[in-house]
Image (cartoon, grey):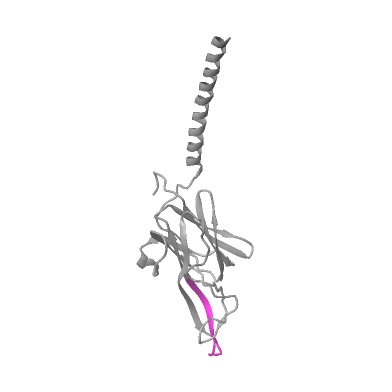
Amino acid sequence: MRRIWKPMITALVVVLAAGLLPVSFASTAEAATRCRTHWGTSVEKQVRAVDGPITGVRAARRGCFDRVVIRLKGTAPGFHVRYVSRAGVGIPLRGRTQLRILVQSSRFQVGQCMPVGCDGVAGEYRPPNWRNLINLKGFRTVRQVAITNQEYSLELNEGGYDYDITGGETTYGIGVRKRLPFRVFTRQYATTSQLVIDVAHRRHRHHR
């Protein structure tokens, strides 16, 4: 009996081991192909100036990419997103490279603005820290999100005392671990909209 069962047990162990190996390799291959982030690193843009205003910024971790979302009231804005040098962003950001995000909307509500400035305008977005808008602990790709510049258009109203905000642009900088593929798109809801920037966790062999 020993001569009969011992080879069978040995053969069974070998078969099981041989069966486990393909499963392991298949799982690795599946994980590699699951991330459909075959995006690019070139400029993404769309022209559409809107009243806004910008109401906030948030970020989220996904299995294959890090996401930054700029929230607005009203119509989804135009944008111009590209990789730039540190000089192109204007301030130093954490990470080996930076994304510059120009949003065709102001953080100010369209309306009256006192001659001394726009700090008192209703609906103004006031982040507590312009250089670190979001807590990014645990994120794999995005290292820092900051407001780097803001511009707005003013027109003197009929009374000649106050100015009306008629539009503007806001520039964000995203510090990135290294130059990785990204995508940009907008979402439109009933009364609000979003500008979404996704930055992949890794680079695929074929990308533009």
Residue 161 rendering spot, x and y as whole percentages: 54, 90
Locate residue 176 relative to residue 16 in the image: left or right. Answer: left
The one nearer the camera, 100 or 103, is 100
Q: Quadrant of the N terminus?
A: top right
Report the span colored magenta.
Answer: 157-169
Q: Name the residue rendered at 55%, 74% in the picture.
A: 126
Q: Is residue 17 above or below residue 98?
A: above
Q: Name the residue rendered at 53%, 79% in the picture.
A: 165
Q: Name the residue rendered at 53%, 48% in the picture.
A: 63
Q: Is residue 44 above or below residue 102?
A: above
Locate residue 62 relative to residue 90 in the image: left or right. Answer: right
Tell me which corner region of the image, top left, top right, bottom left or bottom right, holds residue 6: top right
The one nearer the camera, 124 or 25, is 25
Residue sitting farthest toward the bottom: 160
- Tell me how many marks there are: 0
Residue 82 rendering spot, x and y as whole percentages: 41, 60
The one nearer the camera, 32 or 18, is 18
Asked if the stretch drawn in magenta spans residue 184, the answer is no
Q: Name the residue rendered at 41%, 58% in the picture.
A: 43
Residue sitting farthest toward the front: 2
Q: Is residue 76 above or below residue 37?
A: below
The one nearer the camera, 177 or 198, is 177
Residue 64 rendering spot, x and y as whole percentages: 50, 48
Asked if the stretch drawn in magenta spans residue 158, the answer is yes
Residue 190 rendering spot, x and y as whole percentages: 64, 62
Residue sitting farthest toward the right: 190
